[in-house]
Image (cartoon, rainbow, N blue to C red):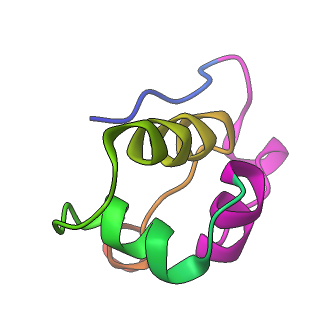
Amino acid sequence: MMVFDVNRTPSERKLARLADVAARAGVSTATADRVLNRRPGVRASTAQKVFKAALELDYLPEQDIRFA
């Protein structure tokens, strides 16, 4: 479950892309995708970096954005 910065309004948030999360975490987009979709084959330490980056960027998967 991701927690968002409630102090920023939606208009103040820039939508983060998967590439932004990957860059912040220092991993490839493929690795970030694996982590965020909870697929196996990624070290726990790497997964932590990706989840931390996603939280910092208020990342929302595209599917959630389309149906929000």
Does the magenta segment cover residue 37?
A: no
Closer to the camera in the image, 13 or 9: 13
Q: Is residue 21 above or below residue 2?
A: below
Q: From the viewer's perspective, is 7 left or right of 29? A: right
Is residue 16 among the parts visible in the rendering? no
Residue in the picture at 58% in, 79% down: 29
Q: Identify the residue shown where x is 65% and y is 72%.
A: 17
Closest to the observer, 65 or 21 = 21
Residue 63 visible, this angle: yes
Image quarter where the C terminus lies is bottom left
Report the label total.
Answer: 0
Q: Is residue 6 above or below residue 59?
A: above
38 is higher (above) or lower (below) than 13: below
Percent position (x, y) of residue 35?
34, 60
Could you say which quadrant of the image residue 3 lies in? Answer: top left
Q: Is residue 9 above or below residue 65?
A: above
Which residue: 31% across, 74% down? 67
- In the rendered image, residue 11, in percent from the top left (x then y), is placed at 78, 49
Q: Looking at the picture, how far across and down is residue 4, in whole percent?
A: 52, 30
**Where's residue 12, x and y in %?**
83, 43
**Residue 20 or residue 48, whichever sits in front:** 48
Q: Locate the N terminus and report the quarter of the image it occupies.
A: top left
Q: Nearer the viewer, residue 46 or 15?
A: 46
Residue 22 within the magenta-colored segment of the rendering: yes
Q: In this image, 38 relative to 24: left or right?
A: left
From which residue to which does the magenta span run?
7-25
Quarter of image, res 65: bottom left
